[in-house]
Amino acid sequence: MDVGIDDFAIHFPRLYFDMKDFAKFRGADFEKLNKGLGLNAMAIPDAHEDTATMGANAVARLIDRNGLLPSQIGRIYLGTESALDGAKPTATYIIDMLQQRYAKEHGPDSFRNCDVVDMTFACIGAVDALHNTLDWVARGGEQDERIGIVVFSDNAKYDMESSGEYTQGAGGGGILIRANPRLLVIPDNWGVSTTPVHDFFKPRREVPVKNVIERVLDLARETGQSFKSGLSDRMMRNLRGSKMSNDELFAEDTLKIHRDTPVFDGQFSNRCYMESVKQAFIDFHGKAQRNGRLNPEKDPILTEQWKRIIVHLPYAFQGKRMFPDVFRHDRRGTPVWDEIVEEIGVEPLIDDFEDTPEGMAEFEKANDGYRRAISKTKAFRKFADERIERGQRASSLIGNQYTGSIFLALMSSLECDYEENNSIEGQRIGLCGYGSGAKAKVFEGIIQPQWKEIASRFLLFERLDLRRPILSDDYEALHRGSTTQSIIEPSQEFAIVREVNGGLPGEKRYRWVD
């Protein structure tokens, strides 16, 4: 039975920080950010928005547009790396909002029998949710008619003045999964590569309470205050014996802190991305040969069979900068590769370098240079322009969406093909997901006859044109969380309830705003 993607809906903040203004604010080179990385703007969540609201808004749009009944939806699986809680799934907050939204028409517990869960593996979490939900729909068979929704929602937030700040973005989306889909059939053939690395992560940090006290005392001394030595030790002893020691913040001698911003090594992460996607592609290629999907003698270059190639885009030009490794692997031993070698020379081989840390570093440097040379060849530039470029266009206006970046690229590519009146029905597209830590998945989609009907309703770029720009003061206030006042008052969307009466500490509430 054919299963796949029937429809998409996406929600992105109505605020954005123009990259020209950001560059001026940070003293950065706009031409480098724009021409080098493809950045035009970054989506910024307003004060009433978070991971849950963005996801819920997208799912509501998907339900309304397709006339779905809550009782028809068997599961809502969320892929995110911006979870709101260490135990309670963010998907339950989305369900809570949906039940409020549809209670009048369908009753207060209309999603009672819907299975929900969060799936987290950095930026590939939503691809994992898609993979899992496709299997679940397929197991239902023709009679069950299972319907699932995959949600992606993230706030891709980096420390201010860090090397990742300019790639920020945010948004949420919903993907309707069912049998005999109108948009994209996804065959059950997946290439996978997993390897444990520390290229990007969000650790649980621990800070001794005594260090916090000493820092406060140091700040006080800078203002001219004087204190006796040993004051911090006495304060700690008094704290342990006071009523404050029962407070959740001071119950232990260390504060456990989780931050939304990551620890990362950008260059190392790029290498992990390239190697993971390449290895997943090799795995996919081998499986495609074994199951008869690919005939290497008749069709030696698999990526030439993909009309479009959709990849995870932490920034708009990441795809065309990272894909030369797969491009090279897929063409070795063919006349096309012979022409490339004639143009840029023979590639460096690892066996030509000493098996030492210094030798491996030299190989990596040489290989990086060769990869850049591949990206500048006529063959690769033509390949990227035809197959990858359309997916970049929305990313350049929104920025990183973490788990949603690959699906934003897919929507962008499909809408561009629709606007250009391109004939892609029946064509295969390749999809390459990546999540730091690190894992990649490579799979295919087959464009269905009704794809234009679905893509025509995205209105992605039309909606992007309606956003409001913000300047540095508002950006900083929203980034720091120092304001709870929305810049644009919420309307026809879900919003955070700031004043929660009763309930347990940290309990979150949301409401639909007409």
Image (tube, helix red, strand yellow):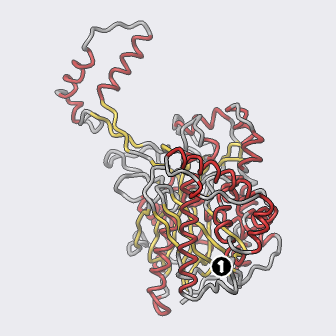
- Percent across and percent down for residue 508 are 41, 50
- Percent across and percent down for residue 213 are 32, 23
* Along the line of sight, the residue nearer the viewer: 32 or 109: 32
* Along the line of sight, the residue nearer the viewer: 462 or 20: 20
Residue type at numbered disc 1:
Leu
Q: Quadrant of residue 458?
A: bottom right
Task: Look at mark 1 in the image and give the residue it sits on.
Answer: 183
- Percent across and percent down for residue 407 are 61, 65
SS class, disc 1: loop
Picture residue at 79% right of the left edge, 63% below the top: 342
Q: Residue furthest left?
A: 241
Left-right relation of 35 to 196:
right
Asked if residue 135 is positioned above or below residue 388 in the image, the reply reads: below
Picture residue at 31% right of the left edge, 9% below the top: 227
Q: Quadrant of residue 386?
A: bottom right
Tag 1: Cα neighbours inside 10 Å, few (<14), some, or many (≥20)? many
* Along the line of sight, the residue nearer the viewer: 205 or 142: 205
Picture residue at 48% right of the left edge, 85% below the top: 138
Quadrant, the C terminus:
bottom right
- Percent across and percent down for residue 91 are 44, 62
Q: Quadrant of residue 242?
A: top left
